[in-house]
Image (spheres, rainbow, N blue to C red):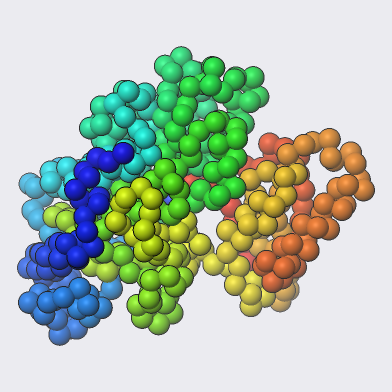
Amino acid sequence: MFWQKSMETMDREALRALQLKRLQWTVKRCYENVPFYRKRLDEAGIAPADIRSLEDLKYIPMTDKCDVRDQYPYGLFACPMKDIVRIQGSSGTTGKPTIVGYTRNDLNTWTDLVARLLTAVGVTSEDVAQVAFGYGLFTGAHGLHQALDRIGCAVIPVSSGNTQRQIMLMQDLGATVLIATPSYALYLAENMEKMGLKMGEDIKLRIGCFGGEATSDMMRDELHRRMGILATDNYGMSELIGPGVAGECVYQQGMHIQEDCFIAEIVDPNTLEPLPVGEVGELVVTPLFKEAMPILRYRTHDITRLDDTPCACGRTFVRMDKLHGRSDDMLVIRGVNVFPGQVETVIAKFPEIGPNYEIDVTRDGMLDKMEIRLELTDASLLEKYALLENLERRLSAQMHAILGLDAKIRLVEPFTLKRFEGKARRVNDMRNIYKK
Ligand code: DLL
C-alpha cells in the first residue's frame, strides 16, 4: 500500500533530477540564511552555484553532532522565529538536548513521510493506534501521532511507562497498532503473558511500528511470536527530521530511504571518503526539503549498508540494512573492536536465552574485562547444573568466535535484567571510573 505512490515509485532518473533540484535549493538556503554554513562553504571554496550535479555533493563539508551542539539552540535555523511552529529535540547523554525546529511546511512534509511508512506496512484509517513513545521533546511520539492522525486512525496518546495501565487501555480500547521502542514492546509482551492475556482475543494488536533503536531479527521474531504482530523497523533522527527517514515495507528486506526527501551516502568512518553502494560504512544524510533547519551531509555515526536491488513492493527507493551498530557505540576492549549488536547475533542462536542482555566493561589494573549478563528463558535450568554449565560453555565459545575475545558469561533468572520504557541502554562502560 502507498501513501504518495507517484513519489514512492518514481523512476530513478526522475528521482535523481528531483534530488539535484532540491539539493541546490537546500545549499542556497543554508548559504544565504545560516552564517555557520556560509563560513563553512566559503572556507571550502564552494558557492551554491557550484553544485551542478549530484556528484558535486562530495565537495560539500560534512556537518557533525558537535556543530549542532556548538550552535545551540538556534544557530542552525534558517528562518525567523515567527516561521517556526514546533521545537523538538533529542536527549543527549550529557548536558543539553539537541534542539531542532520546524516550519509549517516542514511539519506537513514530515507528517506525510511518516504516513508513507505506516501505510507501507498496512496501517489504515480502520486502525486504533496506541502511541507508547514518550511525549515530549523526543520526535518519536509527535512524529508518529501526526501521521496516524493524518491517515485517520484513532490515536491513543498514552505515552511511555505505566505498563499495567498501558496494557489495560490496549485491551479495553482494542488497539490494533502499537508504536514503541522494540525493547519496550518486548517488556509489554512479557507483562501481558504474566497477566495471562491471550493475543488475538484479549489483545487485538496486528502491527507494531518500532524504531528509535535497533529491532534485531531476533527481536522481530520474538515480537511476532509473543504478540502475533508484524513487527516493523523504522529509522530516523531528530536532526534529519525525526522518524520518517527510512522504514521497512511488508517484505522486510531493509528500510526504504525516502530518497525524494533525503540523499543517503555511505562513507568510510575513518577517511570520510564515499563508498560504493553495497559497502558497509557510516550513513551520511542530506535532507532536501527542510526550511527551518536544513543540514548538509549530516554524519549519523550509524553503520549500515545500502541495497539498490529492486524490491517486490515496487518502491524505487534504496534500502538500508538494519543498523550494524553506531561508530561511537563501538567498544574497544583489549584492542578488539566490539559492537553490542554482535552479542545479539550470538544469543539469537540460543533458544534458552532471552533477547535482553547487559554488558559491563571494567578495568582491573591494566586489563579490560567484559561481563555479559544473559537471561534464561526457563528458570528451571538453574537447578540443572550440568545443563547450565554446558550452556555457559557453548555461549562462551560462540562469543569468543564472534567477538574475538573472552567474555565472562553470567546467566541470570528470567525477568531480572533491567527493562526500559524508551531506548534501551545495554552497555555499562565503567573503565573511566576504574581509571581514577
Ligand atoms: O530516534 C527518531 C525516531 C523515533 C526514529 C522513532 C524512529 C522511531 P533520535 O532520538 O535523534 O531520533 O535518535 C537517533 O537513534 O542515530 C540511531 O542511532 C538510533 N535509531 C533510530 N532509529 C533506529 C532504528 C529518533 N530503527 C538515533 N534502528 C539514530 C537502530 C535507530 N537505531
Observer-nearest of 6 and 155: 6
Q: Position of residue 240 (x, y in %)?
A: 28, 56
* Residue most extreme to the right: 386
Residue pictured at 52% horizontal, 27% vertical: 163
Tell me if 38 is positioned left or right of 327 in this view.
left
Q: Position of residue 372 (x, y in %)?
A: 70, 56
Observer-nearest of 244 and 330: 244
Residue pictured at 72% horizontal, 74% vertical: 367
The answer to whether residue 264 is above or below residue 216 is below
Residue 76: which quarter of the image? Answer: bottom left
Q: Position of residue 70 (x, y in %)?
A: 28, 66
Tell me if 151 is positioned left or right of 354 in this view.
left
The image quadrant where one finds the C terminus is bottom right
Evaluate whether residue 401 shows in this view.
yes
Tell me if 40 is positioned left or right of 224 in this view.
left
Residue pictured at 60% horizontal, 67% vertical: 338
Tell me if 203 is positioned left or right of 272 in this view.
right
Residue pictured at 64% horizontal, 78% vertical: 335
The answer to whether residue 403 is above or below residue 49 is above
The answer to whether residue 8 is above or below residue 430 is above
The image quadrant where one finds the N terminus is top left
Evaluate whether residue 132 shows in this view.
no
Q: Position of residue 16 (x, y in %)?
A: 19, 65
